[in-house]
Amino acid sequence: MKIAAIRTHVLRHELPEAERFQSSFSTFRERWACLVEVECAGGVTGWGECLGPALPNAAIVEAMAGRIIGRDAWDIEPIWLDLYNEFRDQGQRGLTMTALSGVDIALWDAAGKDLGAPVWRLLGGAHRMKVPAYATGGFRPVGRDRIEPTVREVTGYVSEGFRAAKIKIGYGAAEDARAIRALREAVGPEIALMVDANHGYDAVEAVALGRAVADLDIGWFEEPVTPEHLRAYAEVRARQPVPVAGGETWHGRAAFAAALEAGAVDILQPDVCGCGGITEMRKIFAMAETAGVRVVPHVWGTGVAVAAALQMLATLPPSPPRHEPRPPLLEFDRTPNPFRMAVLAAPIEHEAGEVAVPEGPGLGFEIDRATLERFSARR
Ligand code: CA
C-alpha cells in the first residue's frame, strides 16, 4: 500500500467575543486544528491530527512528506523511526513530535482501513468498548468574573449526564480555591471534580492550593507547575494531598521516562496527537504499567483526536486487573468549537457521560470534507 500523497488541512474559526476564554496563560480568541491526510495508492486514505499550533505543525508535516511518499504505508514503525531520527537533533520534543504524531495516527488509520479492522484490533484487542468521559471546561471567560459562570457551566454538564468534570485554575491560588469550593458545594459529593492549572503556579503556590482544597475530594491536580521542572512536580506531590497529573506537554518516550524516574506524577497524561502518535503512545502505556502509574490520556482537538484517543483507551490495560476494574477516563472537551465534531460525518457523542469505542475500520470514522473546506484557514 504505497503512500501517494500527504496533505495537511488547517482549520480556523474566530470565536465571537462572548465565547472567548482563558487558561492560566493563554487566551482563546480562535480555534485551530491541523489534520493530516495520508492518501495511499489504491484509494485508502488515513487521517491524523497534530496537537498544538496548527500552522507550524502543518509546515513540519509537509517537510516530512517528501521522506515517506512512495513508501509502504504499512511500514509504520520504520517510518516513525526514520522521521524521528531525521529530525531528532532539533526535534526530540515539541512541534516535531506533534507533527510526527499526526502522520503516525494517519498511517494507523490507513492500515486499519486497508485491513477492514479497527486500530484497537490491530493493537491486540480491546479491554473495553465503552469509556466514561469527563467534561473539560470551566475556563475563565475573558474580562468577566469566573466563579458563577463556572458553577453554571459545570452543573450543566452534570445535568447532561457527566459524572466527572475538570475546571481550569492557575489564575491565583486564593481565588482558585474559592472557585473550587463553590463548585464542590454546587455539584455535591458524588461528582468527580478535577482541576488543571496549565502550569500557572510555582511549587509554593501549588502546595498552598492543594492544601486549601484538601477537604474537597479533588480527583487530580493537573499541570501544577511548568513541565520542565520535574523536581518541582515531585515536591508538589510530596507536600500536598491531591494526586498530581501531567503529561500533555511531554513528548516521546524519553520525556515520559524522565517524569516517571523523577516520581513527578500520580497520573500520567500522554496525548496521542502530541506524544508521538499511536506507535509511541503504546510504548508509553507499557512504561506506565511497568512503573505502576495510572494513565488518563490527555485529549484536546477535533473528533479525529477523540477517535484516536478512544482507540488507545480501548487498549489501555486495566491496572490492576480485578473483578470490577477501575475504568480509565476520556477527556471530553466542551469548550466552544464549531468544527470539533463537524469534521466527522457522524459526531462522537457521549451518552449519560459514557462514550463508545468506534467499531469501524481504522479510527472508525468518515471525514466530512465540506467541514474541512468551510473552516479552511487557507481559503
Ligand atoms: Ca490540561
Image (cartoon, rainbow, N blue to C red):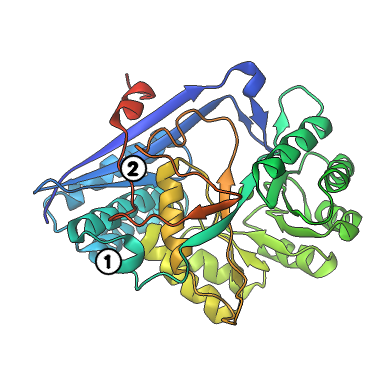
Q: What's the mark number on residue 60?
A: 2
Task: From the viewer's side, name the closer residue of 327 and 375.
Answer: 327
How many numbered circles are shown?
A: 2
Classify 102 as above or below 288: above
Classify 282 as above or below 289: above
Q: Is residue 62 left or right of residue 339?
A: left
Residue 159, x across and y down, in percent: 70, 41
- Which residue occupies 33% across, 51% down? 364
- Which comes before the other along the chain, label 2 or label 1? 2
Classify 321 as above or below 210: below
> Within 8 Å of ligand 1, the CB of disc 2?
no
**Quadrant where the image shows the C terminus:** top left
Q: Is residue 233 left or right of residue 151?
A: left
Which residue is under mark 1?
77
Residue 179 sits in quarter: top right
- Which residue occupies 80% across, 70% down? 238
Residue 95 visible here: no
Q: Are marks 2 and 1 in contact (CB under 8 Å)?
A: no
Sort mark 2 into few (<14), some (14-19) or many (20+) by Cα contacts within 10 Å.
some
Q: What's the mark number on residue 205?
A: none
Residue 109, x across and y down, in percent: 29, 54
Residue 43 sits in quarter: top left
As shown in the figure, which amino acid type bears the numbered disc 2? Answer: Ile
Sort mark 1 into few (<14), some (14-19) or many (20+) by Cα contacts within 10 Å.
some
Residue 345 sits in quarter: top left
**Quadrant where the image shows the N terminus:** bottom left
As shown in the figure, which amino acid type bears the numbered disc 1? Answer: Glu
